[in-house]
Amino acid sequence: MTMRRRPVGMKTRLAAIITALSIILLAVGWQDAAAAEAKSQLPDWRRYAALSNESGEAPIIALVIDDLGHSERELKRVMALGEGITLAFLPYPERAPELAGRARENGFEILVHMPMEPTDKSADPGPNALLTGIGDSELMRRLSHNLARLSGYVGINNHMGSKFSQDRYAMALVLNELEARGLLYLDSVTIGSTVGARLAETSRMPYASRDVFLDSLAEQSFVERQLRQVERVARQTGRAVAIGHPYDETLEVLERWLPDARKRGFEFVPISTIAALECAC
Ligand SMILES: [Zn+2]
């Protein structure tokens, strides 16, 4: 007489499947939680970094558009330039928090465009600007106030600041605070004798430095010439940092130039990618 194997009941089989599925789900959940935990431990300049599509084989360009936060129409036009562009928002315009949030939701990397004291006394850097000679505690209050206006940014770059960025003591205070908060510093280099990038390099914090201003003159032919300079720097050194403004002249030229530059092999990366290459951190 042959022993007939008892068929496994439907209920038993179902129970086994459910157990296996639960184990898989638990494992996936644990992995997700672990990934989220690891991400939350990253400094903000890495945590909020936009994705970089850098191949490692082409010259890279970080293109930063500054002075944003006032206008939605302007922001939409800048975002339409496409991925890899970094957007710097002034902290004080009423709509800046909302517009910066919109840029983040659309996958853009953002900076706080920090108002700093210019040498030209007739130029107004805006409310809560970082000034030399206001005392340490007021300086730190203004810095914290401006940083608290926006969220999800990787760091700051200076708006104006030709006077402030030459002041070694004041800049060291600002950079120390940025470092403690895990933020990067992009030196806009509004004056050649800025100490910002140099101090950041010495303290081994993430930083980058502007190579080319696109529109110190808001004329299309000027912007075109500056973009040729951006290409030269990128080809010679492997990377370039350009800063422009949302002027009609600048945006019109960029709208023509960007698709062409992409076709010719230049890759556009968020500013954090350049900082990661520059810093020994
Ligand atoms: Zn500015």
Image (cartoon, rainbow, N blue to C red):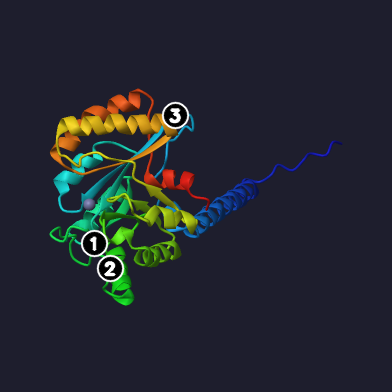
> On residue 86, which mark appears?
none
Q: Position of residue 75 (x, y in %)?
A: 20, 46
Determine whether the residue tagged by mark 1 lies in a helix, strand or loop. Answer: loop
Residue 11 appears left or right of 263: right
Residue named by callout 2: 132
Work out whether mark 3 precedes mark 2 in sequence or the reverse, and give the earlier one: 3
Marks 3/1: CA–CA distance: 37 Å
Residue drawn at x 43%, y 47% as measured from the top left:
275
Establish whether ligand 1 lies closer than 8 Å to the Cβ of label 2. no
Establish whether ligand 1 lies closer than 8 Å to the Cβ of label 1. no
Determine whether the residue tagged by mark 3 lies in a helix, strand or loop. Answer: loop
The answer to whether one can see residue 111 in this image is yes
Residue named by callout 3: 58
Residue named by callout 1: 117
**Is there CB contact under 8 Å for labels 2 and 1?**
yes
Q: Amino acid at mark 2?
A: Thr
Q: Name the residue at the right extreme.
A: 1
Q: Position of residue 28 (x, y in %)?
A: 55, 50
Marks 3/2: CA–CA distance: 41 Å
